[in-house]
Image: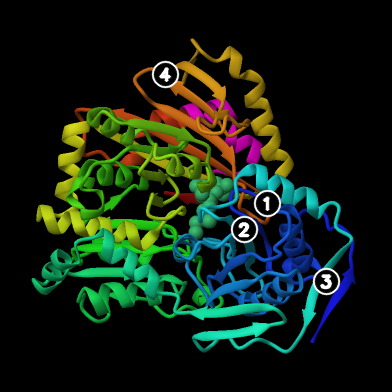
Amino acid sequence: MSIQTVATQPIAGQKPGTSGLRKTTPEFQKHHFLENFIQSIWNGIGGVQGKTLVLGGDGRHFNTEASQVVLRMAAASGAAKVIVGQNALLSTPAASNLIRKRKADGGIILSASHNPGGPEGDFGVKYNTANGGPAPENVTAKIYAATQQISEYLIYETQDIDLSAIGESTLGGMTIEVVDPVADYAELMEQIFDFEALKAMFAGGFRLRFDAMHAVTGPYAKAILEDRLGAAPGSVINGVPSTDFGKGHPDPNPIWAKPLVDEMMGPDAPDFGAASDGDGDRNMIVGRGIYVTPSDSLAALAANATLVPGYAGGLKGVARSMPTSKAVDRVAESLGIECFETPTGWKFFGNLLDAGRATLCGEESAGTGSDHVREKDGLWAVLFWLNILAKRQISVADLMADHWKTYGRNYYSRHDYEGVDAEAANALMDNLRARLADLPGTSVAGLTVTAADDFAYDDPIDGSRSAKQGIRISFDGGARVVLRLSGTGTVGATLRVYLETVETEALDMDAQAALSKVIAAAEELAQIKARTGRNEPDVIT
Ligand code: VG1
Ligand code: CO
């Protein structure tokens, strides 16, 4: 065994996006690509000498090989210890928990999350800091700068390290501790939720369907929902992680988790349906006959939080990403707690959670989480819902009907145009941006614009400013259109159009129908069809 110093050169395109660096798998497998990025993480964070790191991934194609590279590079640069999930698997929230629990200095998560996997799919690498959360922008900026200056990397030359057995080994001066990926996480869930109430509910015949979408949450969901809580065997479907997610797209939304939604809308539907994404941080909630938008889910969790033992003392505050609907704002108002609006991406919640200003956070993209970790957490959200249902003895549909009656309903939808020509997408955004100042007071598709801007976020904790986080246009009566370009895609550009309108009387409409005016206004403002050449969105959530 010896440490190799390998000469290399900067590789273009290694700028972390909304959630780490994501590229197609073949691109990640190119000569030096992964090694350059890992060394740049080390260089960007001031080295890993003497540090303890957590390592795990969502099990997609290249996860195994990449984890070996990370271990060899951590050892070569003098890390003291790497705590790694068995077979290099860890869900994102479980990794966040381990970093915090074991007081590690940070962690590497190998995942492209909801992006498809496999030899022709996507791969990704994310660096999380000592608080367990995604590296904030000042850290990713340093990592990116390091990718542009790199001239060499250090790596141990060694045989593959066995990650299949729990226990400790060494590589050079570094300890490698292989841990059960599920145990610590399951223990944390048991501390937060009323497992006795959940057991009683399942024992009483409550029927659940959890679609793990062939991704990392399968083992977690089986261990917790079926083994510990007594959900009927087979409640967890697609529960064995596969390297290409069964050739599926592990994004829990009504398009990609359609079989589950169909089952929940059909006759003899279970009481509760849920799905999670590639790395286990997203959740989709479906009741019998009702799809709950992630924005509504966040609001419902906030309104009912004190029913959960872990939040019995009440919420310090809530936070949502800017494009997420304002449903939770109404709950915060009635609870008399702060409500923060942050840019898209979990990294912006970390400061608020660390400072004790927010307890619950959420995004419209099916991410919900709390101060129990510093990531969004799919299975946690499912348990949160189940805990509420167990305590209130109510169906999902009745709970939401009751919620809307109390707070009004924020009809909400996101329209995605995927793989759009990047130039055309940028031109669309630039064109709209240039007209923002003139929009207030004008009428668009029968709606009057009350405000229009390009969202900039001033972090209330560290004072940092993040500009150009999405165009938002508000209309009188509380309707809103938000447009932004995705920062997680790997092919062309993805235009996301977020649509929202508020109703206090008509609470039972179809969302697309309720939003028809807002959809027309978005089209008129941004000329989406003409500029993208698309007649309709690829994904409607
Ligand atoms: C998307 C979502 C965002 C989420 C991010 C990472 O980003 O919109 O809300 O935080 O994915 O989620 P973008 O830039 O493509 O809109 V995950 O579960 O893919 O790590
Ligand atoms: Co994810």
Question: Disc 4 marks which residue?
Answer: 446
| Residue 195 position within the rendered picture, expressed as x and y whole percent measured from the top left | 20, 66
Name the residue: 43% across, 80% down.
240
Crowding near the residue tagged with mark 1, few <14, some 14–19, many ≥20 C-alpha atoms within 10 Å: many
| Residue 532 position within the rendered picture, expressed as x and y whole percent measured from the top left | 64, 41
Label 3 amino acid? Answer: His
Q: CA distance from mark 4 to mark 2?
A: 46 Å
Label 4 amino acid? Answer: Gly
Nearer the N terminus, badge 1 or badge 2? 1
Nearer the N terminus, badge 3 or badge 2? 3
Question: Disc 3 marks which residue?
Answer: 31
Crowding near the residue tagged with mark 2, few <14, some 14–19, many ≥20 C-alpha atoms within 10 Å: many
Contact (Cβ within 8 Å) of mark 3 with mark 2: no
Contact (Cβ within 8 Å) of mark 3 with mark 1: no
Q: CA distance from mark 3 to mark 2?
A: 21 Å
Label 1 amino acid? Answer: Pro
Q: CA distance from mark 1 to mark 2?
A: 10 Å
User: Which quarter of the figure is the N terminus placed in?
Assistant: bottom right
Label 2 amino acid? Answer: Tyr
Contact (Cβ within 8 Å) of mark 1 with mark 2: yes
Contact (Cβ within 8 Å) of mark 4 with mark 1: no
In magenta segment, residue 283: no
Q: Nearer the viewer, residue 531 or 223?
A: 223
**Mostly what secondary structure, the magenta segment?**
helix
Question: Disc 1 marks which residue?
Answer: 16
Q: Which residues are magenta?
A: 521-535
Say if 65 sits above or below 334 in the image: below
Name the residue: 21% across, 54% down.
309
Say if 295 sits above or below 285 in the image: above
